[in-house]
Image (cartoon, rainbow, N blue to C red):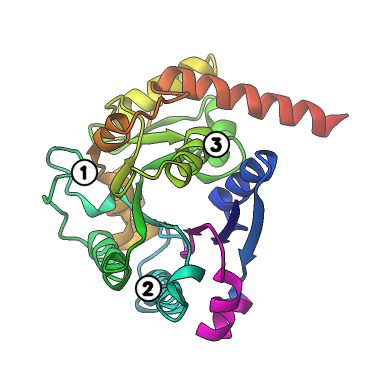
Amino acid sequence: MKIVITGGTGFLGRHLSSYLLNLGHELVLIQRSDLKQGTDRISKLVNSSDVLINLAGSPVIKRWTVSNKKEILSSRLMSTMLLAEAILGLPPSKRPKVFLSASAIGIYNSKKTHNESSIDFGDDFLAEVCRQWEKCLEPIKKLNMRVCILRIGIVLGADGGMMKQLIPLFKAGLGGRIGSGKQGFSFIHILDFCRIAAFLAENSQCNGIFNLTAPEISTNLLFTKALAKACHRTAFFTVPETALKLIYGKAAVALLQGQSVYPQHLLECGYQFAYPDLGNAIGDILASADFSASVSRK
């Protein structure tokens, strides 16, 4: 298949691109420079593709200053609206057969466990970003093509995201829970993220909203204990709420609150997780990190 990806140079995009290339697919990566050229340029890149995957978006874990909030929101909305306009401008026979567009589980509130039918959304900045992000897809939903919204959880991988920063700390015995540790921790192994994207692209019955999280419901405290155990260390420390608020301001809510999310739609469609539980996921990631470290020393 010919697969077009935005955000292909980020943590998720790099792994997904490599995974899809290994499967033998043809890839086209839309760069920031392409997005700046507007709809005509994007239409040429998307033209006659089989799958369009949208992962573009600025990182959210940083102080939510006025300028940073504008960047977080606009980086997601502008890229998604450009892609939508590009698709609408193509004749039906030249449009992608399926559009996979990223969102996040941050759309949900932190008070209950959510599946894809939940409309109990949060009332903070990140939830509003996700709502507006997904709303950009409304024009595409009216077309005769599949649209899969990927509400992505905390992605675990050795070479990016939170694990890249946490593994050295935990191996040094400096790990600990964040705040109370009771907040939801809905994770997904980077390999499952890649496998799910390919699964949704290939299965024509898959359409609508999908929670990209493992089926095991966990918390920050359980994650902390599992990572410490895998590193053969204790985790006595606690990162206090006040310290996070001093560093990140209002953005600290993204770390202090978490969602409990269940991937019901994926399971109903027949997807089988490679890493459905936290222990196995962390064990594999640590093995990957150790292997990479040993190779780099040679």
Residue pointed to by mark 2: 77
Residue pointed to by mark 3: 157
**Distance in Å between CA atoms under marks 1 and 3:** 24 Å
Residue 8, numbered circle = none
Residue type marked 3: Gly
Residue type marked 1: Glu
Q: In this view, does 287 lie to the left or right of 218?
A: right
Q: Which residue is drawn at 31% across and 24% down?
A: 216
Counting residues from the start of the chain, the first of labels 2 and 1 encountered is 2
Q: Is residue 3 left or right of residue 106?
A: right
- Residue 47, percent across and down? 56, 71
- Residue 192, percent across and down? 48, 33
Membership of 56 in magenta stretch: yes
Q: Is residue 38 visible?
A: no
Counting residues from the start of the chain, the first of labels 3 and 2 encountered is 2
Q: Quarter-wise, where is residue 29 in the image? A: bottom right
- Magenta range is 33-58
Residue pointed to by mark 1: 116
Say few, some or many: other residues with alpha carbon within 10 Å of mark 3 (under 14 / 14 to 19 / 20 or more). many
Q: In this view, does 64 lie to the left or right of 17?
A: left
